[in-house]
Image (spheres, grey):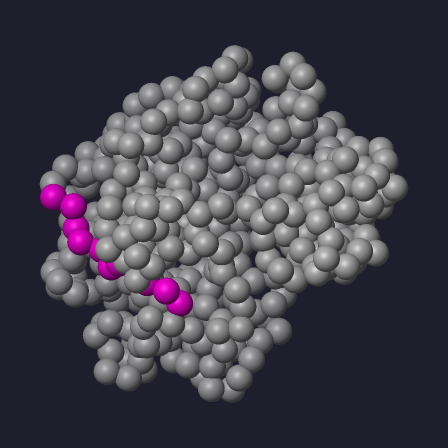
Amino acid sequence: MNPNDVLRALWLQGGLPAEALDSVHLTGADPVFPSSFAVGTAAQTTVAAAALAAYELGRLRGSAMPQLNVDMTHAAVEATGWFSVDGIAPDLWDAFSGLYRCADGYVRIHANFTHHREGAVRLLGLDPVTSKRDDVERALRSWGALDFEEAAADKGLVVTALRSFEEWDATLQGQALRTQPLFTIERIGNAEPLPLPPLGSTEAGDARPLAGIRVLDLTRILAGPVGGRTLAEHGADVMLVNSPLLPNIAAIADTSRGKLSAQIDLKTEEGRATLQRLIAGAHVFVQGYRPGGLYDLGFGAHAVAKLRPGIVYVSLTAYGTQGPWAGRRGFDSLVQTAMGFNQAEGEAAGDGKPRPMPMQILDEATGYLIAFCAAVALYRQQQEGGSWEVKLSLAQTGQWLRSLGRVPGGLSTPVPDRAQYVETAASGFGELRAIRHSASVAGPPQATRPSMPPGSHAAIWPGDDNGTTPSP
């Protein structure tokens, strides 16, 4: 599909004024990475949608709509999530993560977190301390792929069986997914439009379109953090809220660019009270907890809307809110495997060998869609009032990517050189080299907050003396 048509469809689904599309210029065409899927189009159009929605909200706040440019190769390189710290690009995958052959097919194990790795190894009857990857390979040869997937899910682990598109479509979850749109934005309560500070009156005179908008980012694994980083890129005050009890992945050095970073233990009364104070001054609340996790702690969508009438509450899941897998944990690599993408890439290559897409495009595109939907809901809040809930999932993004069609010969495309898109900055992790944002406008770039480790900042909004003062 033509990228301009794809962007238009996204924009119209968001319900924003169609004339704004005249202000965006898209360059490039698939294939830009070795894939039979339109990964370049997916990256470019979601980046463009997020940026354009931010600037449309800025226009509502009194600023002019600029000419926005998004190059497809740049957007796709950004979607690889490449970065280095002090000259070292970390290995983002645990040695046990990956695709394994079973008695009747394949399964993919996600083992980047210790408890997931050890749980999968124990499920095979192996010692998680002494076992090696080849021990896991041998043990899985006696398991059926679907049997191991189900046994792992019963224990809260993250494993999926490899399926073709046809096999996925035949599952109850695949059938449920077909009834769900790419995203939903729904009004969940009554409220007056929240006052926003004038652009240019905020910290350091920031005139970016989301300046002065406060975003709570309660996410850890890629899609949510990318969404928060994108909102920060357009000027929002994004506060990443981590638990001091939970691990993070190395990519936090990249995805924390532009954010404040605080730690709050929501299992304590003090921690919950602190989050309530932050909510009182927030405009957007983004969460990627397991389904029902924050609801159990008292921070579901309706509870947060009562604490802060007018808030935009964004929920991210792996497989959507309907169907038997609605409560199942998942990551990009697993969703690709379960939904048929890995099998399809192997078939397109002609050797039938399952292979992942060249980047975690479901994570990345969903992250940009989080930023897009948050800006859309903020726009509606300003126009109509109300509290709003946004729902997205990696699987819904996968269904959308599949709808974009295939790219003949795409797998023969070389990987582009990233060098021209890399920027270098000091950070709390060390010298950080990462891909600069691919949505550009004319004029000098605005300075952004450096990426900092979890807990580097107090849980207080900029400009508040004690964290209790709502937004101006």
**How many numbered badges does the structure rendering display?**
0
Q: Residue at horizontal 38%, vertical 55%?
A: 253
Toward the front, the furthest residue is: 130
Q: Name the foreground residue: 235 vs 322.
A: 235
SS assignment for the magenta stretch, majority: loop
The region drawn magenta spans 444-454
Q: Which residue is found at the position 73% from the left and 53% from the top?
A: 131
- Residue under the image location 24 percent in, 78 percent down: 464
Residue shown at 33% from the left, 31% from the top: 418
**Picture coordinates of residue 49, whole percent (x, y):** 36, 39
The verdict on residue 453 being magenta is: yes
Camera-side residue of 319 and 145: 145
* Viewer can see residue 178: no
Q: Is residue 228 above or below residue 216?
A: above
Residue 51, quarter of picture: top left
**Picture coordinates of residue 38 (x, y %)?**
49, 25
Q: Position of residue 108 (x, y in %)?
A: 69, 42
Question: x%, y% of residue 65?
Answer: 19, 41
> Within the image, what quadrant is residue 292 found in?
bottom right
Is 448 part of what is drawn in magenta? yes
Can you say which quadrant of the picture contains the C terminus?
Answer: bottom left
Asked if 232 appears above or below 50 in the picture, the reply is below
